[in-house]
């Protein structure tokens, strides 16, 4: 049953709610996607949040490498007030070995 609080799409079908953590993970993935060799089909899993003030989002990103295989890579984004902090995120990613982040 659909209640008045449920969100509906254009066809009137119920839309699945997205958690705040998933929304922030999507922000992080969208920040990182342009830096991937092949961003098509990239996705995330294993999302958690921590750090001072709970602003550091940790996740595993799966994306194609230059050989066409999908490989996982740990990533972290700094999320403040619902926005990716690019400076701190570059520092976190550099610490995880993403490399060449000064070129972004």
Image: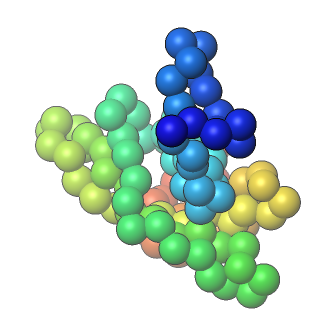
Q: Residue furthest right?
A: 81
The percent coordinates of residue 57 (x first, y second) are 59, 69
Residue 78: % across, % down: 69, 66
Residue drawn 84% across the image and 60% down it:
81
- Whether residue 101 is visible, yes or no, is no
Colouring scheme applied when the structure was drawn: rainbow
| Left or right relative to 29: residue 55 | right
Q: Residue at x 51, y 24 (%)?
A: 13
Q: Quadrant of the C terminus?
A: top right
Look at the picture and state if 82 lies above or below 91.
Answer: above
Query: Which residue is nearer to you in this view: 47 or 5?
Result: 5
Q: Quadrant of residue 6?
A: top right
Total number of numbered discs in the rendering: 0
Residue at the bottom extreme of this rendering:
52
- 68 over 85 or under it: above or below: above
Q: Which of the pair 11/66 is nearer the observer?
A: 11
- The answer to whether residue 47 of the structure is visible from this angle is yes
Q: Position of residue 41 (x, y in %)?
A: 32, 34
The structure residue drawn at horizontal position 40% and vertical position 53%, both measured from the top left corner, is 44
In the displayed structure image, the side of residue 76 where residue 73 appears, left or right: left
Farthest residue to the front: give it.
Answer: 1
Foreground of the two, 14 or 38: 14
Q: Relative to residue 70, is residue 95 drawn left or right?
A: right
């Amino acid at each position: 049953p659909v209640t008045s609080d449920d969100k509906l799409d254009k066809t009137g079908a119920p839309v699945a709610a997205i958690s705040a953590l998933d929304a922030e993970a999507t922000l992080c993935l969208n920040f990182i996607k342009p830096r991937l060799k092949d961003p098509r089909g990239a996705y995330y899993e294993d999302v958690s949040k921590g750090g001072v003030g709970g602003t550091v989002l940790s996740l595993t990103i799966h994306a194609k490498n230059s050989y066409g295989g999908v490989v996982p890579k740990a990533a972290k984004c700094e999320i403040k007030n619902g926005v990716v902090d690019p400076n701190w995120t570059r520092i976190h990613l550099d610490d995880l070995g993403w490399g060449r982040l000064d070129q972004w």
